[in-house]
Image: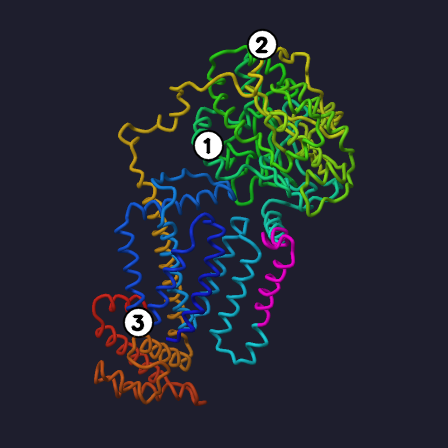
Amino acid sequence: MKWLDGVVAYSVLVAAFLVIRAMLFPEMSIVPALVLVLLWMVARIQWKQRGGDIVLIASVIFSLIFLSTYIDDVKRTINELFITLAEHKHIYMDLLSVNETTSWLNGMILGQIALLIGSAMYYAVANQKRWIPVALALVTWSIQLILGTSPSLLLDILFFAVLIVTLLYMNQLSLRWWKRIAIVPVSLVVLMFVYMVISPNGNEEFTGSSKIEDRVRYQGEKWRYYKGEEPVLTAGNFQRLSTFTPDDHTALKIAMENPSPLYLKGFVGSTYTPSGWKEIDGEAYMEVKSLLEALQKEDFTGAKQLSLAAESSLPDQYEEAKLVIQNVGASSRYIYTPYELAEIDGNLVRSKQADALHATGIFGRRTVEMNYMLTPYTDYPQIANAVYTTKGTDYLRRESHYNQYVYNEYLAVPQDSLNVLRNHMDESVLDTETRLPYEKTIQEVENFLAQTISYNENPKPIKDQDFLTGILEESKEGFSVHYATVATLAFRMLGTPARYAEGYIVGLDDVKDLQSFSEINVSEKNAHAWTEIYVDMVGWVPIEVTPGYAEKMPEINKKDYPALDGSDSPDATGGSTVEPEPNDTTEVQEDQDKPEDSKQVNPNTTIWFWLNIIIAFVMLTLFVLYYVRKRKRQQKLRVRDHRLAVIHHVQYMVQMLEKEQVVTKLPSFETIPEAVSKIDPQLQLEAEDGLKIYQKAKYSPHGVTDEERVKVETLFAHVHSAVKKSKKGVKRLRFIVRYQ
């Protein structure tokens, strides 16, 4: 086999491996994989099949010698995959316990997987199987579409270029055609590297990459989650943010048992970046997943915490009502819920503890029913006042755990943003040793925004710079997205946990004089962004900071606000005054429902479970491919046209003899009868007659008779049987799998 075949196959593998590794396993080392496959390629070229088998067996023996380290490597690899799924698809699974966080064997399992793919690539290049590299490309790009992410445009273009060059090589085009066609991918690669050299951001990433990837991802989301017109807000993505020019098309249809103003939140931003708000990072969430799931088992979630606080502290005043939301034109990715949420069917929600409530189903949910409490969010000071006087309740115990999670996650401000805010906010407020009361904090943020930003629905676009910096130091104007972004970061600066929220408002005018369960049309003009802050022991409440919107919503009831001297309020430095008890049942809730003999689980059980799942999936895939290939072959051999049937039988027979090394590659018709006679002497005359019939079918205008077709089919069956009898052991099994 030509050494160039191995180089081409290795190039395709490396390009694909870099893309997949950057998407799914960014922390895993690529060195073991690339070295292992390179050794396999060299051995395969130098010593053919035997050399490749030696490298494969050696890698398995090596893994068995260092089995414990190898198992840790497999666990780390699976953990990386779990973290990727959590971050991009909000699929949360428990991480596997690893004895060593890093080791010199890091990436070995990826190398062995790459070795199998490399074998397929080498076989494809050597045997002109163009569908194999194309299938690899489709799988790679499908992963990007499913996850909604990609490593970078540069890696994708490199992979595409290598794929094109490989297909050209497999077609064995002349130099003239190489010059004409191969210049396209080569030019793309050269242009990308030139851009990286001359661009100020070139040493980091091709800046157009994220924009193009965002457009592709957004088109996929529109197809899955949207109907009709494009939404005016962008789920925290500043790159797609334009002016606030909504139209009248209906986003939601709502029916309430007791019509009242509501904030219906969909997207919730946890992490601020220069280009937008993102939901909670998958890796960060995985660290507290067990705690939040334990709270969820006790019916405590952040989404309905306000109603839980009211029910716990004001049981005599607590009432619930029904709310039905039909999603007409909004994103069906989210379930839009009020802050007064009391109960919702858990089967409708993909993630109950992440920032936003993501709907189940490939296309999300269009109709959702839920219960909400009649005590409005505007009475949260009254709820707080009541909660602060209670002691030792189950609610407070659970809240103390959730409180710690909130303060760990929702106070983060990037250093650059922190510096910008310090330059514009009142230093005397920032330098206070104790946290301000909530009412004072809200007032300070409102004053800061009033002095810094002016409302404009057509603000100057902020491009190629940090969004916060662009607002405070250049444009100094904006609409709800701009106000909510600055306010959220300002609250965090003042020590109050805060999040950015987008959704729709049901205002005072929308519910005026409405009867029970009257239909309310919420149009895109009701789209809005706001800030929500965490009130200790009470939960998340919306804070309106955008001019003009305070009049659309009811005022906060401040007459029952907790005393400002700290006597009834939480710790002035922030956080709940209720500390988790050492023997708190919440921390061990995960084990309560398990039998005693199952609580001590072998740490390797989960890893082998997932390995078995993967093996079963691979075997099923191979079986399907085998079945499809066999059926396609049978259709060719059983074709009604005698002439085509004869041609297909002889071509398939010659192909089989070539692969089993009975004849040389591209044999002449004179050598085939002699070669098969070495297996079975009786086949020589039969082969000569069969090849004459083939030549007649292939080149003669005369037709093929039924008798001639039967002769060729009989020849094919005899040759097949003779070759199979000549094989022993594993070779016979391989022959049966290939040709049976």
Q: Which residues are magenta?
A: 183-211
How far apart marks 1 and 2 lie (CA) works out to 32 Å
Q: Nearer the viewer, mark 1 or mark 3?
A: 3
Task: Write the residue at 43% across / 49% down.
Answer: 28
Q: Is residue 653 above or below residue 308?
A: below
Q: Which residue is mark 1?
A: 288
Q: Is residue 28 above or below residue 487?
A: below
Q: Which residue is mark 2?
A: 567
Residue 713: which quarter of the image? bottom left
Where is residue 200 drawn, in percent x and y?
Answer: 65, 53
Of the image marks 1 and 2, the number of the one nearer the N terminus? 1
Of the image marks 1 and 3, the number of the one nearer the N terminus? 3
Residue 590: which quarter of the image? top left
Task: Write the residue at 29% across / 45% down.
Answer: 68
Residue type at tag 1? Val
Secondary structure found at label 3: helix
| Res 47 label | 3
In front: 113, or 730?
A: 113
**Does residue 126 show up?**
yes
Q: Is residue 347 above or below residue 437?
A: below
Tag 1–tag 2 contact (CB < 8 Å): no
Tag 1–tag 3 contact (CB < 8 Å): no
